[in-house]
Amino acid sequence: MRQNEKKELERAEIEIEELAMQLADMLGAALFFAGVKKEKIPEAVDAYLKGIDEVFGDEEGEMGFEEIVKVIEHIKKTRPHLFS
C-alpha cells in the first residue's frame, strides 16, 4: 500500500471513530429525552443494544426512526427502573 493510501485510510478510520462517538452521544440524548435517568444512561445504552436483538433477533436491516422507537419502547417495558 502506498503512503498516500495509508494516510487516506488512517483519516477514514479516525472519521469513523468520531462518527461512532457522536452516534453514542446521540443515543444517550435520545434515551435521556425518552425518560432515562441521567445517571442510568450507560446502563440504558447497554440495554438498548441488547434490546435490538431482543426485538429484531437475527434480522438484518437498517435501523431507522421507527425501529429505534420500537427498541426504546421495548426497554421502557422490560427495564422500567432505568426511566424517571
Image (tube, rainbow, N blue to C red):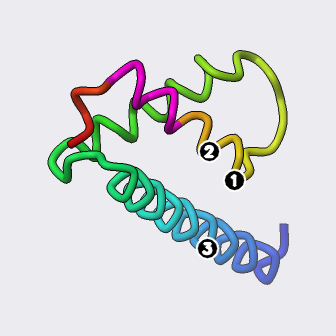
Residue 11 appears left or right of 23: right
For marks 2 and 3, give the one nearer the viewer.
Answer: 2
Q: Quadrant of residue 77?
A: top left
Mark 1 to mark 2 CA distance (whole Å): 5 Å
The boundaries of the magenta stretch are 72-79
- Magenta residue check for 73: yes
Callout 1 secondary element: helix
**What's the CA distance linking mark 2 and mark 3?**
24 Å
**In the depicted view, which residue is nearer to us: 14 or 61?**
61
Q: Residues within 10 Å of mark 2 (few under 14, many from 20)?
A: some
Q: Is residue 14 above or below residue 43?
A: below
Label placed on residue 19: none
Say which of 20 and 30 sits in front: 30
Disc 3: CA contacts within 10 A as few (<14), some (14-19) or many (>=20): few
Residue found at x 33% / y 23%: 79
For numbered disc 3, what is the local secondary structure? Answer: helix
As shown in the figure, which amino acid type bears the numbered disc 1?
Phe
Give the residue at x 73% y 70%.
9
Task: Give the residue number, with chain letter if any, for mark 3.
Answer: 15
Q: Are marks 1 and 2 in contact (CB under 8 Å)?
A: yes
Q: Quadrant of residue 4?
A: bottom right
Marks 3/1 in contact by CB < 8 Å: the verdict is no
Residue indicated by mark 2: 68
Q: Earlier in the sequence, mark 3 or mark 1?
A: 3
x then y, percent, for residue 81: 22, 27
> In the figure, 40 relative to 3: above or below?
above
Badge 2 amino acid: Ile
Instruction: Return the residue at label 1.
Output: 65
* Residue at the limit of the structure toward the bottom, as seen here: 4
Q: Cα distance, mark 3 to mark 1? A: 24 Å
Assign the N terminus to one quadrant of the image.
bottom right
